[in-house]
Amino acid sequence: MQAIQEGYRGLAVLLAVHWDRLYYGLAIICALFLGSFFGSLIIELMTHPAFH
């Protein structure tokens, strides 16, 4: 039980020190997802225009 508590405490310290790297990674993933989503939407609208 003590090993689990020490491991949890170590993980909490590691996240407290490197939280910004986690945010940077999530921001990059979100930007790539949104870019691909809007890019595919624009391509779809350019190849199949609704109003012609």
Image (spheres, grey):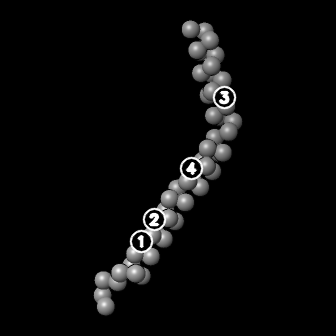
Q: CA distance from mark 4 to mark 3?
A: 20 Å
| Relative vertical location of residue 9 with respect to residue 52 in this rendering, above or below | above
- Amino acid type at image mark 2: Phe
SS for dot 4: helix
Residue for badge 3 = 13
Q: CA distance from mark 1 to mark 3?
A: 42 Å
Q: Which residue does the numbered mark 1 point to in the structure image?
A: 41
Q: Nearer the viewer, mark 1 or mark 4?
A: 1
Front position among marks 1 and 3: 1
Where residue 43 sits: x, y (%)?
44, 76
Residue where numbered disc 4 is placed? 26
> Label 1 vs label 4: CA separation?
22 Å
Q: Is residue 52 above or below residue 40?
A: below
Tell me the quarter of the image containing the C terminus: bottom left
| In the image, farthest residue toward the right | 17
Front residue of 28 and 36: 36
Asked if the residues shown at circle 1 and circle 2 are in contact, with their CB atoms under 8 angstroms apart, the answer is yes
